[in-house]
Amino acid sequence: MRGHERESTRRSRRGPWIALLAALVLILITLVALPDREGDERCGPRGVTSWSADTRLTGEFARYGDDAERVDDWTGGDGTHSVRLPDGRLLWLFSDTYLGAVNRPPNPAGQSHPWRTADAPFVRNSAVVTDRSGRLDRTLAAPLFPDTAAGEWRWPVAARVEESGGEKVVRVLLWTRAKGAGPYVYGVPNATEVATLSLPDLRLEGITQVLDQRQVGDPARRVLYGTTAVDHQGWTYVFGADDGEKAVHRAYVARVPVGRFSSPEAWRYWDGERWGTRAAPVLGDGKQRGVGTAFTVVRDAGTYVLFTTAAGAEGLTKVTSYWACSPSGPWHGPAKAFTPPLPRDARDARDGATPSRTAAYNPQAHPALSGGGRLVLSYDVNWLDAAPAAAQAELSRNVSLYRPRFVSLRLGPLRER
């Protein structure tokens, strides 16, 4: 009897510990599954309270692009992203890029601005480096990320500096796209990849595929990740969008432990309830609320703020925003939009009006240049034309149309609309 009593006593003592352990495991599973809801009491409606054109940064890219002494450097591009390097330099990444040199005015059309010849070199991506003082210094050999054997090209998006084997490297997210027609004249989305660049020489060491979308039959339902990324509490939240035919797209979010960009098995996608292997949109109704294929997100005073163009009726000349207390939402907005400055063209602008075919798109935050309550935002500028050849001719005729421009924003509490 005494043996049975001792065994019963041991079991009764183990019982509370087993129950406690089970409770802890359940809590951990719940924390992994739930979205990033910090419970920050500061979180609330937040957006742009004031803004101004950043003529210094805009002028620096104009200076560098117009330098006629360079014959193989960047003269214009879009898809503007940046990352601060450990030695203080800034790496700028671009998608479609014009190289070569620009010519001094007048151009053949008699306009008084620099121009490039119709045979100027054109590549699918490039990288430009500023020195420690912030002056644009050189263009890396382009394209930095080669086309694939399948005839696809790569557009670089968000980037991070990470540790790898005891050394620091640059991880660059890439969008892989292939030639398309109809609504996909800018390419059919195929995959998200991560490239590794060595430091300090910025040499390409390798490319890893993170998410293959080629098996998704409808290109409009394919999602590419990396338009923007936000670090918080040990996670990097990576945002993306589908490639639907309409101007209003749906936003998605994935997360990966900080420092594991290049580990596909570490990526998890928000499916509407938890982080897993499937994805569901966190913002967008396909009509009035949504994002462009490229947008940006920052975390400010406990609130996530998303900036986008091409949302609903705002069109490709305005920048609007949404806010949320978690990367997975719910996202509130859109807030009141603002219209950033666009280049004027004497042939099309009258009495200070903006050329109707000049578009602003792809707003991107640049944390390395922000601070002191100021957020630096770039936006790309392009010329809209139904005929691609006519659009390209316009970009060569007026080189200011295909370069990033910058604004400085101040964020603060907003009243919900």
Image (cartoon, helix red, strand yellow):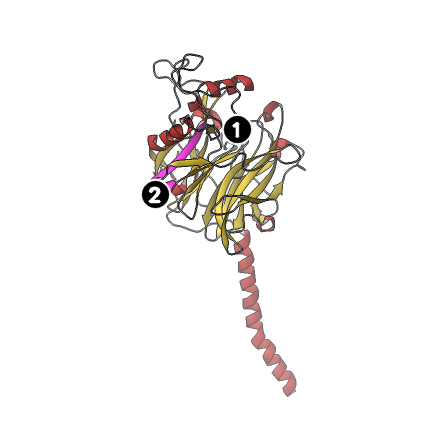
Q: Quadrant of residue 371?
A: top left
Could you tell me which quadrant the C terminus lies in?
top left
Residue at (57, 32) in percent of width and height: 243
Name the foreground residue: 406 vs 331.
406
Residue 176: mark in rendering? none
SS class, disc 2:
loop
Q: Which residue is mark 1?
A: 287
Q: Which residue is mark 2?
A: 371
Name the foreground residue: 387 vs 279.
387
Residue at (56, 43) in percent of width and height: 194
Q: Is residue 52 visible?
A: no
Residue 398 screen position, x and y as percent: 44, 20
Q: For the magenta stretch, what is the residue range?
A: 369-381
SS class, disc 1:
loop
Three-letter code, disc 2: Gly
Mark positioned earlier in the residue sequence (1 or 2): 1
Residue 304 screen position, x and y as percent: 43, 43
